[in-house]
Image (cartoon, helix red, strand yellow):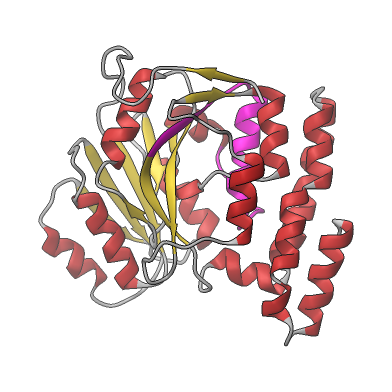
Amino acid sequence: MTAVRNPGPGEAGGTDRLGTLDIMLPHYGDTGLMQAAVRSVLEQTDENWRLTVVDDGKEEGVPEWFASLGDSRVRYQRNETNLGITGNFAKCVDLVESTHFSMLGSDDLLLPNYVATMRAAVTALPDAAIYQPGVQVIDEHGNPSTSLGDEVKKRLYAPKTGGRRLVLSGEPLAANLLGGNWLYFPSIVWRADVVKEIGFRKDLSVIQDLALIIELIRRGEKLVVEPVTAFRYRRHSGSLSSSEAVSGARFGEAVRFFQEVAAELDGHGWPKAARAARLHLSMRLHALTLLPGALRRPDAVRTLLRYALTGSR
């Protein structure tokens, strides 16, 4: 994978290229976890942020809680009708006003240095479209956690930064991510103009982030890997991706996506990336790790085994 070393955190990189960071929070689900996510934004050491919460639920007391915050940087609105996860993502992108934004998960947490770290990365390397910070994985109780999937991606796919920012791009990056997606979507800072142009695919519900990233890379955009840990990503059994994975639904969507993107990358002249898409080994291995949790559902076991062994639905 092609990488270019650039100034590290805190090193000179030019004038400030990012003023206010738009933090978009598409919410649906646990109110307590969402409130913790909002508090993590309020605790930022760098105050150059604006939080926009788009509530796709109907929980009582939520609008009143936001009104009680009394912070003009926090904007809240509730959808009149449920848009679903991808529809709410799209609405959040439409509401972005700054040059860069993040899409915070309503059960994830920013570390206090997140905004400062990501503004420094954008300032040092302003020509990228995707900025990935260091991430700590936590469980549903907020404790440090790990999984076989996270460890495999970290050891086999994620680049070693050596404490320096990396700039990655092109077919090697696409092949790498299609083999094992080591990025953490809610932690990423995006350049708004290119995301607004492409948007999220409406036919995808749990792999739409990878589809957007691969399209950005195919168009020549760059990814910056920021080594400083600035984000806490929550994994728990109640998430949409976890529930759809155990049922096997996630993998039906994945097969369709990988088949389509493989054909597109062949046509783009990227055969290595197309081959990685057809194999998608990391996701097939992930299906095997879910088998113990699906033993009481024979249909799910059959789906997971078929997907893991053949890569088909």
From the image, which quarter does the C terminus lie in?
A: bottom right
Q: Camera-side residue: 235 or 106?
A: 235
In magenta stretch: residue 226: yes
From the image, which quarter does the N terminus lie in?
A: top right
From what the image shows, is residue 248 above or below residue 44?
Answer: below
Q: Position of residue 64 (x, y in %)?
A: 18, 69
Q: Position of residue 267 (x, y in %)?
A: 84, 27
Left or right of residue 214, residue 258 in this image: right
Q: Position of residue 214 (x, y in %)?
A: 65, 35
Left or right of residue 111, residue 277 in this image: right
Residue at far front of view: 162
Say how many tags the image has: 0
Q: Is residue 202 visible?
A: no
Query: Residue at the spot x=39%, y=70% of the render?
Result: 57
Residue at far bottom of view: 296
In magenta stretch: residue 263: no
Residue at far top of view: 14
Left or right of residue 268, residue 192 in this image: left
Q: Camera-side residue: 194 or 165?
A: 165
From what the image shows, is residue 232 above or below residue 100?
Answer: below
Query: Residue at the spot x=19%, y=50% of the render?
Result: 43
Q: Position of residue 159 (x, y in %)?
A: 58, 34
Query: Residue at the spot x=33%, y=68% of the render?
Result: 33
Query: Residue at the spot x=47%, y=63% of the render?
Result: 145
In the image, the segment drawn in magenta is: 199-228
